[in-house]
Image (cartoon, grey):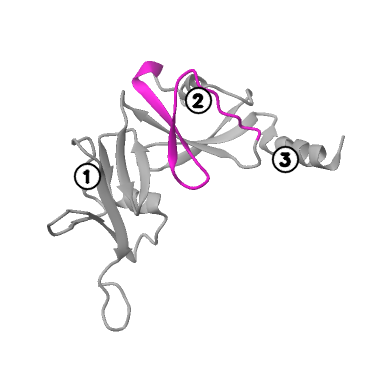
Amino acid sequence: MTTSQQDVQNSNDSKHGARGFEIQIGNEELSFHSAFIEDPVPTGRQIIDLGDFRPALDYQVFQVLKNGLMENIRPDETVDLRATEIEKFLIFRSDGSFRFELDGDEFQWGARLITGLTLKKLAKVDLVRYGVWLEVPRGDDVPIADTDLFDVSKPGVERFFTGIVKTTEGGAPC
């Protein structure tokens, strides 16, 4: 076995223990838990089944990519878990997905509603110092509070952006 093959094997061994390959399964609040699967190349349906979501047809799987964006995984589509990092997946009870833009990046979301806090988590910004706003062309942008539920199912693509919330002269958030 070559050195690079040995490195890949060692990496696979650390991810594939006695219980199988570790993955992270999350929900629309971006709350994740560990799960283990034996198949190194599972289908979307296997991931839904692993999360014990029934009936499977009522759910969608999104893979959280390394850059933080998400990709919808069809029930018959496979995902290779043999990479060096633990893969993350979001599972939504939904039959459709909704697109929005956040800080210039396009996201797909599997639920009709999303909170301001979840938007900030997706943007990977400091949750205390930053706020999130809905961009309103030719109007005043609308702040989205952490606990506000925003409906992304409306026609068109919503555009959100984050920024540091208003500060006092000393630099502490208001």
Residue 61, image x, y percentages: 43, 29
Q: Earlier in the sequence, mark 1 or mark 2?
A: 2
Q: Secondary structure at mark 2?
A: helix
Residue at 27%, 46% in the rendered image? 115
Q: Which residue is mark 3?
A: 11
Give the camera-side residue of 5 and 26. Answer: 5
Residue at 21%, 44% in the rendered image? 150
Q: Earlier in the sequence, mark 2 or mark 3?
A: 3
- Horizontal side of 74 relative to 80 (left or right) equals left
Question: Does the magenta segment cover residue 114?
Answer: no
Q: Residue furthest front?
A: 138
Q: Tell me where residue 138 sits by quadrant.
A: bottom left
Amino acid beneath label 1: Leu
Residue 90, image x, y percentages: 43, 35
Amino acid beneath label 2: Ile
Q: Earlier in the sequence, mark 1 or mark 3?
A: 3
Residue at mark 1 to residue at mark 2: CA–CA distance: 27 Å
Amino acid beneath label 3: Ser
Q: Which mark, residue 47?
A: 2
- Horizontal side of 83 relative to 162 (left or right) equals right
- Quadrant assignment for the N terminus: top right
Vertical comparison of 98 with 148: above or below: above
Label 2 packing within 10 angstroms: few (<14), some (14-19), many (20+): many
